[in-house]
Image (cartoon, rainbow, N blue to C red):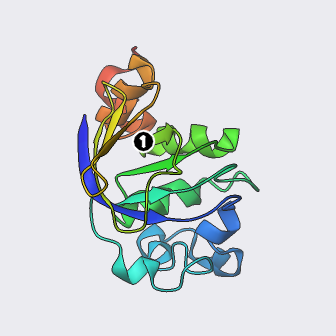
Amino acid sequence: MKLKGKAWVFGDDISTDLIAPGRLFHLRSNLPELAKHVLEDARPEFAASVRKGDFVVGGNNFGLGSSREHAPAILRIAGVSAVMAKSFARIFFRNAINVGLPVIICDTDKIKEGDILEVNLEDGKIADITAKCEIVFSPLPSAMRKILQDGGLVEHIKKHGNIEV
């Protein structure tokens, strides 16, 4: 799986409440509408400006907080192709894979706002086209990559009848 897009850089401790604002709880049954508000408390212009294929780049502890599964789902609906961070809250990481949103654990210090990135999920390489550098990461296990290729866990199970890895 190869991905290409622009980097949107956020800092450490981006919580699920920053991603999917709790005050908009009433929209949880309308994820496309909720996606129009993704990350607006961290950066008000993000939801209106993000483009299909773009990347969210965080620091440490991305996705901390509640087990709000809406958070990775609305990132994906908004067009984010993957989230990169130094570390993820465990439940966010798991929910992201389940909804078909790639999550990459890597050193994000070299990635700057607006950099154009090319990501190879299988090879574990991020080419920062803008900065002309490469970032290496440990690729996700093949089982997770298969789930992502199928569009998430539900689609994977529909396709294979079980969790075929």
The image position of residue 60, as x and y in percent, is: 67, 49
The image position of residue 79, as x and y in percent, is: 33, 63
Quadrant where the C terminus sits is: top left
The image position of residue 20, as x and y in percent, is: 60, 69
Mark 1 nearby-residue class (10 Å; few <14, some 14–19, many ≥20): many
Residue drawn at (48%, 47%) of the image = 84
Residue drawn at (35%, 80%) of the image = 49
Quadrant where the N terminus sits is: top left
Rendering quarter of residue 55: bottom left
Q: Is residue 145 left or right of residue 38?
A: left
Relative vertical location of residue 23 with respect to residue 130 in this rendering, above or below: below
Give, as a three-letter code, the residue at label 1: Pro
Residue drawn at (29%, 27%) of the image = 159
- Judging from the image, what secondary structure is the residue with disc 1 in? loop
Name the residue tied to disc 1: 102
Q: Is residue 80 left or right of residue 10?
A: left
The image position of residue 146, as x and y in percent, is: 34, 25
Relative vertical location of residue 128 with respect to residue 142 in this rendering, above or below: below
